Image (cartoon, rainbow, N blue to C red):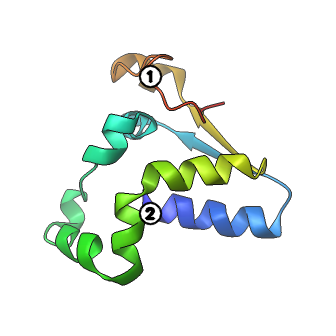
């Protein structure tokens, strides 16, 4: 989650607009519960503590919801959800974060 947000942040600073499309399991990240419960993928097993406790990463990991909200408020970042992924992973309109386009 941190990498796409970092690229979107930089992209919005340089370009007019940035679109983020969430597909597959990442659909769950478009709910507040999913963002708060997100874990580091198996490829990076053992690094989640470093991300949660290390410098600025600690701030980012705890505040993903706020970061998305602020990015959306700029009017330069759009968040999209694959309709198939929303069905497969049960992400309803009601459960999705309000920043979703």
Q: Residue at x 80, y 52 (%)?
A: 17
The vertical placement of 8 against 94, above or below, is below
Q: Nearer the viewer, residue 75 or 15?
A: 75
Mark 1 nearby-residue class (10 Å; few <14, some 14–19, many ≥20):
many
Q: Quadrant of residue 59?
A: bottom left
Is disc 2 in contact with disc 1, using a CB cutoff of under 8 Å? no
Residue 2 shows which numbered tag? 2
Q: Is residue 42 above or below residue 29?
A: below
Please report the residue visible at 53 percent of the width from the left and 28 percent of the height from the top: 82
**Residue 55 disc label:** none
Q: Nearer the viewer, residue 100 or 65?
A: 65
Answer left or right for 40 relative to 62. Answer: left
Tell whether 79 sits left or right of 45.
right
Quick one: which residue is furthest to the right in this view?
Answer: 16
- Provide residue 91's location: percent of width, then percent of height: 40, 22
Closer to the camera in the image, 89 or 54:
54
Q: Which residue is mark 1?
A: 86
Q: Is residue 46 above or below residue 67?
A: below
Task: Point out residue 88 in the picture as x, y percentages from the top left corner.
Answer: 35, 20
User: What is the CA distance from the residue labelled 2 to the residue labelled 1?
Assistant: 21 Å
Q: Work out whether mark 2 precedes mark 1 in sequence or the reverse, and give the earlier one.
A: 2
């Amino acid at each position: 989650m941190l990498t796409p947000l970092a690229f979107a942040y930089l992209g919005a600073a340089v370009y007019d607009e940035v679109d983020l499309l969430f597909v597959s399991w990442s659909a769950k990240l478009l709910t507040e519960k999913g963002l708060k419960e997100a874990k580091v993928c198996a490829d990076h097993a053992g690094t989640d503590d470093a991300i949660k406790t290390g410098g600025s990463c600690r701030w980012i990991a705890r505040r993903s919801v706020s970061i998305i909200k602020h990015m959306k408020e700029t009017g330069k970042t759009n968040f999209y959800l694959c309709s198939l992924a929303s069905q497969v992973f049960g992400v309803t309109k009601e459960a999705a974060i309000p920043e979703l386009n």
